[in-house]
Image: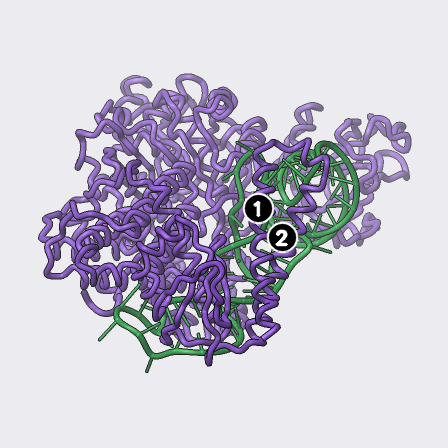
Chain colours: A purple, B green
Amino acid sequence: MEKTYNPEQIEAKYRSLWEDKNLFSSDLNSTSENAYCIMLPPPNVTGSLHMGHAFQHTIMDVLTRYHRGKGDQTLWQPGTDHAGIATQMVVERQLAAQGITRHDIGREKFIEKIWDWKERSGGTITSQMRRLGASVDWERERFTMDEGLSDAVHKVFIQLYNEGLIYRGKRLVNWDPVLHTAVSDLEVISTEEQGSLWHMRYPITGTDEVMVVATTRPETMLGDSAVAVHPDDERYTHFIGKTIDLPLTDRKITIIADDYVDMEFGTGCVKITPAHDFNDYEMGQRHNLDVINILTDDAKINDTVKSAYTGMDRFDARKQIVKDLDDQGLLEKIEPHTLMVPRGDRTHSVIEPYMTDQWFVKVAPLAKPAIDAVKNGDIRFIPENWNKTYFNWMNNIQDWCISRQIWWGHRIPAWYDNEGNIYVADSLEEAQAQAGEGVALRQDEDVLDTWFSSALWPFSTLGWPEQTPQLSRFYPTDVLVTGFDIIFFWVARMIMFGLKFAGDVPFKDIYITGLIKDGQGQKMSKSKGNVLDPIDLIDGISLDDLLVKRTQGMMQPEMAKKIKKQTQDEFPDGIPSFGTDALRFTFAALASFGRDIKFDLKRVEGYRNFCNKLWNASRFVLMKLEGDNIDTKASLSISDEWILSRLQATKVNVEKHLKDYRLDLMSHELYEFVWHDYCDWYLELSKPLLVDDTTKAGTQATLLKVLNEILTLLHPIIPFITEEIYEQCCALTDKDSESLMTQAYPEVENDLISTQAEEEMQWLQTFILGIRQIRGEMNIPPSKPLPCFVQNISNSDQHCLDTHSQVLNSLAKLEKISQLNVNDEAPESATVLVGEMKILIPLAGLIDKGQEAARLNKEIEKLNKQRAQFAGKLNNEKFISGAPEAVVNKEKEKLTSVENAIADLSTQLEKIANL
RNA sequence: GGGCGAUUAGCUCAGUUGGGAGAGCAAUGCCCUUACAAGGCAUGGGUCACUGGUUCAAGUCCAGUAUCGCCCA
């Protein structure tokens, strides 16, 4: 083996090898009884993977590789999403750079351009996934606009339409005036912003009186249909039913009463604009008010209202209207006011409630079974508390606006004739058949919300509506791994559509991962300039390159300076390369529940070191085995039995943690076992055992067996390094195996669990740790051999001494162990205890008396604290009577053993003091 | 306003049926011991946010408070 661990080389080798050998294929072990399937949440096709993706992909890959190792027929389904609005925006921006719009080139040409862009940039994600070692079945890769998936979209749309669950109607929707499209509630982000509250005087017809209405959007007054007051508001009861001369227009509007009005807010009078506010719209319905649309598609004032404002932008109009009102003495006052401003999640432009014809899914009937599926446990959220969020939303779910006035996406399969009749069909031919020969038809211009096709992902990728073998084999899938941010967008809709169309839940478990944040706990975002590219952690990146990466193509170039400084402070030397395995191990180790993750580079470094440790330990093992035949039947030493016993415990825990999706505990368990049990103890124990002919063969066999199982156990987390070491092991033993990936995951061997061995090792470790402690505290170099006496020896101590003297001498670097009888006079010594047995290291020339006395005092003090604790409990009458007998007895035992130790050490202290 | 989560060592975090406070990193001391200095050995460091309750026993269960964060309206 190479002397140093070089992740770059290893990873490059297996990336292609695994795929060439077709090892990720879901057909490989199709004789298996069990199937296991994970659907990759399809990332935006033209995007790139961020840390959150890498994190989730690692989790999915660990689960996938584990189940593959278990022999299940395993499918991890990859693919990408066409991401309608996001992708269209990217290409529109490219056109804008050339000074043209999509309208200049037309629909067909524009879509062609997007396909081009998809072909060019769509490889980014897949190549990133390959770098991460994601073992998806690439042969089954899908794209949401693939033919098969589009067929599924049509079929679902048509059926829902025929069942009355999809309808078209003129409704108030969230309108993005920059994109010129409707968006769903979920795509609108409302944030608090500083604005103003304008108080306007509305004159009451035929009187000198006015009503003062307060609004945050004065320009909407052009579309007012009424002024509302609370029916119980005595200030205004006498106005109800009268009319107002709406300023700046020639309209009269009525004064109405409605419970909805908040008497406390503003003046208690509210202007009602049904066409431009969701609440006003509802009130308008209740009172039969006119719905007066005053805006154009790009949020300019239209010509519905004859006024000087026609053609003005909404915000210019606002200024002008305020000025004009003021000029007419109709502006009472302007107050500063914080309000919630709705903005589009893509464009960040202010969203307008806007009356348009749109397509909707009637969700209530679909939501019911979806709620039940979680309620009755067919679907489990992990961690569980997310089901509250889910129920909360599902119980208040609104109809889903699915039409988008953009070009990139699944075109709505509906046609219109000149009378406005709608024909929903799979194709123009079918629509024509419905409409009859000779009727002129035109297809709906709109496309579907991206999430409509994503919602079908779990079954459309498996071939639905065809009843494919894959569909029956892999549906319902096992677990969905995703972030909380798309529970509503995606998860809920998959459940609804899965139940409706595939006849079962789409997945049994939903593992909601935490969010990866930067080292300061800030959300990673391009605008903050704190994003990390997972590939940069794998390959490393210089400070200069990182600075360029973080500041180029920014929406707000003024942030560049701050980002530069921040980056320089955080990564003064750039980022070193850690390799994929280290990064994956880090993600696994951070995957606990219920909290966001502050990503700490130091952790990656630590796990890189772990990989290095594994590498070197393997090198040691292979060196010690080279040239010998491995006798797997050789008799085993206690050390061998011990490590094998510990290995079984490790396997039990790994399985348990994996079943619970606790990858953090799983990786911790393995880290602990490999580093501390296998490397720190067993490898050290093996050194003396390997030079003894009676123990050599058993030790060699055990070294190899445990290493091999370690590799298999770790493989799901760190596939590259384990595969490489495995290959080296196979070469050594002339074993023929194509890949660690196809090796069976090791089962727990109950007959190898040995409490006897664990107890003896406990004794051995206490002995060695005691000597090390004396060395450490007395600054005796580990290379200096020490004489050693033991006294007060029980039968079992004697047995251990007889068996393990060689190992003891080696690991504790002892010159010789001499036994003393109880009455023998011991030399002046430093002392530690192994149970009742005393270990004495003579002071002569090595150890300072005062230092040893201080050390003993410290030990005794520690023990005294414990004694006080135990005695306190046992002196408590209530404890004796209330606690279970076993607990009381355990407490008693602990007290006795502590008291004995104190007595022994005190005697020793006295002796030393008297010298 | 409603809901959820967090608060444990200097830092990042484990601690799942309530029963002697843990890890990694950082710090300190000693060691270039033939697998590994990306290492070994040892050491120090915590009123488990606060207040009350249940219990023989609370980091863990219950109620409330504070601070921070997220989601929904």
Q: Position of residue A628 (x, y in %)?
A: 11, 58
Quick check: can you spot residue A356?
yes
Question: Is residue A88 something that shows in the picture?
Answer: no
Give the chain of mark 2.
Answer: A
Q: Secondary structure at mark 2?
A: helix
Percent position of residue A597, x then y: 50, 53
List the residue tagged with mark 2: A866
Q: Position of residue A25 (x, y in %)?
A: 20, 40
Report x, y in % for residue A102: 38, 50
Chain of the residue under the numbered disc 1 shown in the image: A
Disc 2 from disc 1: Cα separation:
9 Å
Residue type at the position of mark 1: Lys
Residue for point 20% across, 51% down: A698
Residue A894: give its label: 1
- Of residues A694 and A597, the one drawn nearer to the viewer in this rendering: A694
Q: Which residue is at the front of the view, A37 or B45?
A: B45
Tag 2–tag 1 contact (CB < 8 Å): yes
- The crowding category of the residue bearing disc 1, from other C-alpha atoms within 10 Å (few below 14, some 14 to 19, many at least 20), is some
Of residues A355 and A722, the one drawn nearer to the viewer in this rendering: A722
User: Which residue does the image show at 31% across and 27% down from the upper left?
Assistant: A475
